[in-house]
Amino acid sequence: MAYQSYQSSSNPVLQRERLGYYGERDGAYGASSRKLSLFFATLCVVDLFGVFPIVALPKSIISCGLYGVPLVLFVITLQIYTAVVLGRCWTIAERLDPSIVAKNRYPYAAIAEFTYGKRMSVFVTVLLDLTVFGGGIPNLLVAAQNLQLLGARVSDGSLELSFCYWLLIIGLFLCPIMWLGSPKNMRTLASVSVVVCSSVAILTWISIGEDRSGSGGWTPFRDITLGLPPFVQLLKAYGIIAFQFDIHPMLLTIQVDMQHKRHIGKAVLFGILTTCSLSAVTTLLTAYRYGMDVPNNVLQILPRSWSLYLTILLVTLQLCLSSAVGNSALFQHIEDVLGASRDFTLKRCIIRSTLVWLGVLIAEILPRFDLVMGIIGGTLTGPLIFILPPLFYQRMLELEKLYSQELKRSYSTESSQVSEDPLDDSDTDTLGETRRTWYGSIGSNGSSMSMAMVRDTTRKWVASLSVRCTELCRFMYSDCILAGSVIVFGIAATLASTYYNMFDARDTQRWFSCLSAWRR
């Protein structure tokens, strides 16, 4: 009878519970054959990191000396934690309200609205769009500057086409790639991109090993100090590390396309381990060979060789492929706002091409990719990485607790209606006899019962104190303390990095605008 009552219940909580349990297994949200496996999700994560940790991260770590290693480990560890809790937010949200799957084109904003309302959703959406759009600008700049470097090295300086023109050529090349859909439609691109990243790392190692310039006078780990670097240098390195390892804008987009969404944490971990391994070897070899002389782009200091030429071409190719996957979340949101179809249409091509050329225009105006990385990584990605995920996760845990309480209350209500069984007269007589016997024993043995009551009260007090101490210890080691610490760090790092980037952008005299050069 209880099972039939459960099946016929009109309680909306129970209906959502049944829908969340059966919906995805019955194919309510699409065929599972189109979903990403753990392997391909890991490839997408590695593709999002791209080649920047290989060719542009060593300078930031080396400039901090020995403190660069704990800095990068600390930031990456926090990013793994926040990525995992952000993935858990989506998993919990799907269980509490399966209809949230309909918002899988903008899942981060959907989580924000689910936890803190529409205003938070709008804030997150704007922040995401700015971050994703700005993150594509360093890709364009590094790719264009690499092609300029390639032309200069191949021709021995006689033929050097400015990166300002290469930006236009890259824009033309990117447009057809950007017309593709979501990550689940980009398995081939992600696979090729990972192969390219691995090849770039290996070829860079070969180029460093073949460098014989100054073979009689170079010193291993030249000018690298063991002391604490300036605080400003740590802030700059933090911004670049946060930028290069930030996958949070695209993380949920990958998760909603996964066949097993709970495995998103494994995909992030495997992807970071793969990228960090390649970056660590490159950083060690670069520090050993060039020391503090290494530039922001490692390729600029490497000697002329066939491996360098091939590396430059592969880096350019990977940056273009990474832009196709990384900008997917931005494109999908803009298309929804403008009412574009989710299928391949002319309107989609126009919207995405317009965004690509807008990025090219900004790159022509602001061509310092290291400063752009610092601004985006330190100012925009700080809230997305360190502040919002723990904040949303704590709120989601509260909602899940309320949901569980409501679910238990619904179960107990229906069970009481089915299993209600009044006591018989014989049971009433037995209880009355028991009470009379108990009261009688108090009258005959008052003193002994008083001592027993004192001992019983003492045991209860000690047990209560033990329980409270245990709860306090659990609270100190709970996600609440960890999440609060991460949020405080995120706020402090974001404010400090923003303050530094504002003055760095104002005081720098090394800006060069392609538009200014063309006007001359």
Image: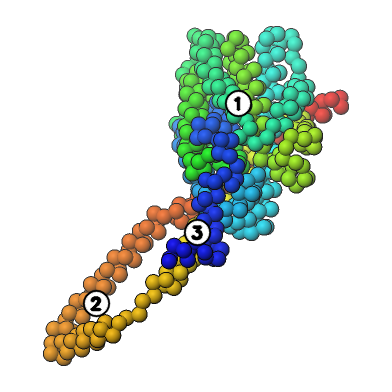
Q: Residue at horizontal 51%, vertical 27%? A: 279
Residue 176 in view, yes or no:
yes
Q: Residues within 10 Å of mark 1 (few under 14, many from 20)?
A: few
- Res 96 quadrant in image: bottom right
Q: Residue at horizontal 35%, vertical 80%? A: 422
Q: Is residue 497 above or below residue 169?
A: below
Say which of marks 3 and 2 sits in front. Answer: 3
Q: Is residue 301 above or below residue 380?
A: above
> 238 or 218, which is in the foreground?
238
The amino acid at mark 1 is Thr
Badge 3 marks a residue whose secondary structure is helix
As measured in the structure, the alpha-carbon distance from the residue carrying label 3 to the one carrying label 2 is 36 Å
Q: Which mark is residue 400?
A: 3
Task: Name which of mark 1 and mark 3 comes first in the sequence.
Answer: 1
Q: Residue at horizontal 23%, vertical 83%? A: 430
Q: Which mark is residue 460?
A: none
- For disc 2, the marked residue is 457
Q: Position of residue 181 (x, y in %)?
A: 68, 35
Q: Residues within 10 Å of mark 2 (few under 14, many from 20)?
A: few
As measured in the structure, the alpha-carbon distance from the residue carrying label 1 to the one carrying label 3 is 38 Å
Residue 82 in view, yes or no:
no
Q: Residue at horizontal 13%, vertical 87%? A: 445
